[in-house]
Image (cartoon, rainbow, N blue to C red):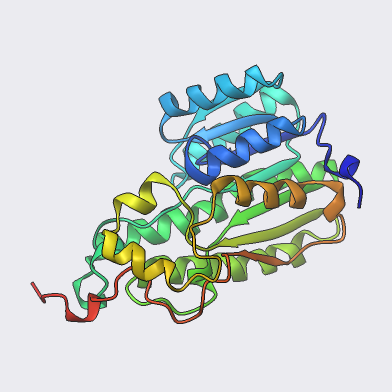
Amino acid sequence: MSLTDLNLSGKVAIVTGGSQGIGKAISLALARCGTDVCIADIDPDLGKEVATEIKALGQKSTVLPVDVTDSGQVANMVEKAIETYGRIDILVNNAGGASGANFRLGRVLRIKERDWDETIAVNLKSVFLVTQAVAKTMLDQKKGCIINIASITGLFPFAGMPAYSAAKAAVINLTKSLAMEFAPHIRVNAIAPGLIDTPRTIKNRTPEQMKHLLSNILRGRTGKPEEVADLAVYLASDAAEWVTGSILEIHGGQTWLAEWGQPDFRDAPKS
């Protein structure tokens, strides 16, 4: 592999949830390598800020407001991207997250049905809907790359995040199924990050929980969004032409069976 293999000049990418955190880092990293980027995000104002940064790098960027759990909105988003750029070379299914009781309270018996459904929809259903809409174009092109942002919670059991973990585990298996179905023209891979330093990471955890988490990471720190973005650039590039159906872990050596930032969740009050 040479550095020229990481040149993505002339490529067009869609990044869901591309306006903040890991998604923003991936959007900017792709742009630095020559990619025009469509930022598909539910928050168009944040998307516009990232698009401005991308244009300052000399690349084109379009903000496409979308709820990735709505098939109609997804279809319209993909149609606009194709109308604007004529092709889609790279899809990064990054939109996701954990919400409500599922993220904070831990106990299965305390999770409301709406929180379960919302978490499954934004983390799993969205990957299916966006991939289904984009893959048609990639198959016509006979070339494309899909990168799903999963999580190590989908690889190893983590206490306190059942819906999120279940969704990410499903994304990992879906990635492998898609790689088989779309071969040989579309490469499909997933990245499984550990604890990444984003605003949501800090907001949803107490200092005690963060200390507990860091004690389970061999590198002794959280990961940076840019470190995940570097891996995404590699997967999108010609350097990864023989990589498909793979799950790339990036977690600083986070030890298995760690409680995901909730060391006391088993003793949480029942009400």
Dividing the picture into quarters, in which one does residue 252 lie? bottom right
Residue 181 sits in which quadrant? bottom right
Q: Residue furthest front?
A: 220
Tell me which residue sits at (11%, 75%) in the image. Answer: 269
Q: Residue at coordinates 22% horizontally, 65% vertically from top-left?
A: 112
Number of dots carrying numbers: 0
Up-down: is 21 above or below 247?
A: above
Is the residue 205 above or below the residue 16 in the image?
below
Name the spot of residue 228 as percent of width and height, x first. Answer: 61, 51
Residue 208 locus on image (x, y percent): 27, 65
Relative to residue 255, is residue 147 depicted above or below?
A: above
Q: Position of residue 30 (x, y in %)?
A: 69, 36
Give the residue drawn at x 35%, y 66%: 211
Q: Residue shown at 63%/59% (left/top)?
A: 191
* Nearest the eye: 253 or 10: 253
Name the one closer to the observer, 69 or 236: 236
As displayed, is residue 32 above or below residue 184?
above
**Residue nearer the viewer, 144 or 250:** 250
Q: Quadrant of the C terminus?
A: bottom left
In this rendered view, identify the residue nearer to me: 21 or 179.
Answer: 21
Tell me where residue 119 appears, x and y as whole percent: 37, 59
- Does residue 244 appear left or right of residue 37 in this picture? right
